Image (cartoon, grey):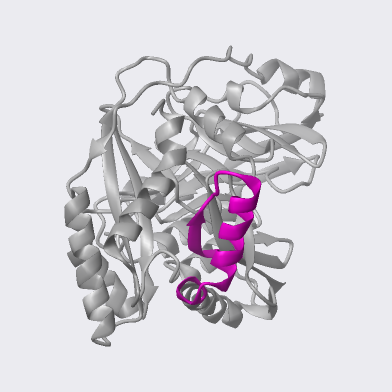
Amino acid sequence: MSQTDDAAQAASARLVVRTVAVDETEPLIPRADPRHPLVWMRRGEGIVGLGEVVRIETTGATRVEDAAAAWTSLAALAEIDDRVGLPGTGLVAFGAFAFADESEATSVLIVPELVMGRRDGRAWVTRISLDPVEETDASGPADADDADVLLPEPAPKRRVPRVAFTPGSVPPEAYETAVAEAVRRIDAGELEKVVLARQLVGELHEDAGLRATINRLAEDYPDTWVFAVDGLIGASPETLVRVDHGTVSARVLAGTASRGAGEASDRERALALAASEKDLAEHALAVESAVKRLAPHTARLDTSPEPFTLQLPNLWHLATDLKGTLGDGSSSLDLVRAVHPTAAVAGTPRRIALPAIAELEGFDRGRYAGPVGWIDGDGDGEWAIALRCAQVDADGTVTAYAGCGIVHDSVPADELAETVMKFRPIVEAFGG
């Protein structure tokens, strides 16, 4: 299925948008909706949305293309008064997309009623409404004091809700069996790499909402993209693509090692990761995948000369940064469509890896490892890969995900242990 009738109707709506600067120093996450949070934060900067003016839902193989088309139509009709002019101001939608074409999960763009943001030492608030505006003439003078009245009071800090996680549909021993089968296929020359994930499932019984969980992720993993969109919550270290006034950038991660117990041990593990033939080979496949798919859309695309070790609180990753100049006027969603799924979350070659994932994993990934982020009225935006994450359903079911890249010398027990490390951020954010 492609764009729904409701999405098509939403895309033809006329939005009135006003962004004004505000004098605001309080953290943004405590102002998020506890039930339906919309959050995109890194190092204390980003955007938080409240309410919902427009929802665009898509499914199937054309889900990103359909969402991009609907967004372009919606943005073209919008009346935008942006007095700040920073990334995240003006018309904005938060988005999360399913990983697979065949997924039963919907992909979504959500335009909030109110957006609060902070970047480069400046803060703002954006009001978005359907035309006609009943309460305020958006074309009138923008008053920062008037905007301040709209800001909700920050919620008091609360403990994180506790979720007891258990293995999902694929128990640990079955995951090891799947990894062994993947290695057999790789050794037989069927493919070079495949990423296999597993689930943990729990129930959210408390009535505390999700702000504390999101805040825990932001405090513990400040250098990641902390996100919450339509129940998808996580802290991703991997930038799928970012577009800002013609500049394109991305960060590719592949190759992982646990942190050491002490400073010397920790450094040894980082050096071992940087010299690991297995991890370097896996990383090279992921970088090649991203470059191959971004290059046709850029006038110039540069990569880090060598992978570097990226330090997170619980892991070391091999990382490569890409940066270039947009060459064809593509929007950030156009580039999302071009690069997703990368070898970092699917495998190589992609046409072989995707069916193998569907067969060997044994469950629908939903939005795990799919694109998550935001887009503005000009098509610029920031998108990460939904990693270190969980989907919180309306009935309180919480499904967490973690996966590993499998190559020819992968060891099933080691890959299982790596998923345990990768589950840690989201499990601890739910009190585990």
Could you tell me residue 345's position as x and y percent? Answer: 41, 64
Q: Residue at x 66, y 65 (%)?
A: 249
Residue 57 seen in the current view = yes
Q: Residue at x 63, y 44 (%)?
A: 91
Q: Position of 376 compared to 409: left or right? A: right
Could you tell me residue 367's position as x and y percent? Answer: 36, 50
Q: Position of 401 compared to 157: left or right? A: left
Q: Quadrant of residue 240?
A: bottom right
- Image position of 33 with respect to 423: above or below: above
Q: Residue furthest bottom?
A: 189
Span highlighted in magenta in the image:
251-280
Q: Position of 67 compared to 201: left or right? A: right
Residue 230 seen in the current view = no
Could you tell me residue 44's position as x and y percent? Answer: 69, 35
Could you tell me residue 246's position as x and y percent? Answer: 72, 67
- Image position of 336 with respect to 350: above or below: above
Q: Is residue 259 magenta?
A: yes
| Quarter occupied by the N terminus | bottom left
Q: Is residue 137 magenta?
A: no
Q: Front-most of 419 and 294?
A: 419
- Image position of 113 with respect to 74: above or below: above
Q: Residue at x 18, y 53 (%)?
A: 173
| Quarter occupied by the C terminus | top left
- Image position of 58 with respect to 80: above or below: below
Q: Front-most of 195 and 56?
A: 195
Instruction: Count up the numbered dots.
Output: 0
